[in-house]
Amino acid sequence: MVRSATVCDAEAICALVNHHAERGKMLHRSLESIYQALRDFLVYCNGPRVLGCLALPVMWKDLGEIRSLAVAEGHQGRGIGRALVDAAIADAKALGLKRLFALTYEEAFFGRFGFRTVDRQTLPTKVWSDCIYCPRAGACDEIAMVLDLDATDG
C-alpha cells in the first residue's frame, strides 16, 4: 500500500536510500534531510514495514522531481517501484504540475511510464542544486528524463 510518509517512517526511508547510495545508485541522505523533506515522501508498506520510498519535491511552478526512489533489497520486481511512481504521477497532477523529471540510471524503468530522455541542459538551473553533494559532480552520468503530465492518461 502506498501512503504519505510519517515521522515514524523517517529512519526506514533513510536506511533504504542510503543502502542504494552505498551501491552508487543515488545520493546519500542524512536523517535530518529526510525529516526536512518528509512531506515530499511517499512510502510503500507491507503492514508496518516500509518496503519502498519516493520523494516528489516541487522544483518550480510547473515542474516536480521524482527522487530517492528506493525499494528494499529482495523486493524489487514486485511492482513496488511502479506503485510509487504511479502515486507520484497522480499527486503531481493533483498539485497542478505540468512536468516531472528524474535523474536516473534506470532509463528503461522510467520509459515505461512515458518519461523521455532529454538533454540535461534543458532543465532549469535550480534542478542542479544538489549536485554539489555528489561525488560525480564533475562527471555526471545520470540520465535526465522528463514526463509531460498533460500527455498522460487521466
Image (cartoon, rainbow, N blue to C red):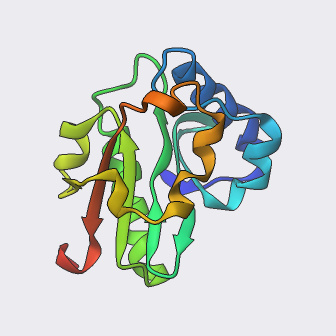
Confirm whether residue 95 shows in the render. Answer: yes
Residue 67: x and y in percent read 49, 47
Can you name the residue that lies furthest to the front here?
Answer: 138
Where does the image place residue 143, in percent across and percent down from the top left?
31, 40
Give me the residue at 65% from left, 53% from top: 5
Foreground of the two, 122 or 12: 122
Residue plotted at (33% across, 32% down) = 105
Q: In this view, does 60 lie to the left or right of 139?
A: right
Horizontally, residue 14 falls left or right of residue 95, namely right
In percent of width and height, residue 137 lies at 53, 33
Instruction: Name the quarter where the C terminus is drawn.
Output: bottom left
Image label count: 0
Image position of 98 with respect to 117: above or below: below
Q: Which residue lies furthest to the right in this view?
A: 32
> For the point 17% across and 76% down, which residue is it?
151
Depth order, front residue of 33/103 = 103
Q: Nearer the viewer, residue 80 or 1?
A: 80
Determine whether 91 is above or below 73 in the image.
below
* Rendering coords of residue 47 (x, y %): 57, 38
Question: In this picture, is 13 found above or below 55?
Answer: above
| Image quarter of residue 29 | top right
Dividing the picture into quadrants, the one containing residue 135 is top right
In the image, what residue occupies the spot 45% across and 53% down? 66
Position of residue 133 in the picture relative to residue 106 (left or right): right
Residue 26 visible in the shown view: no
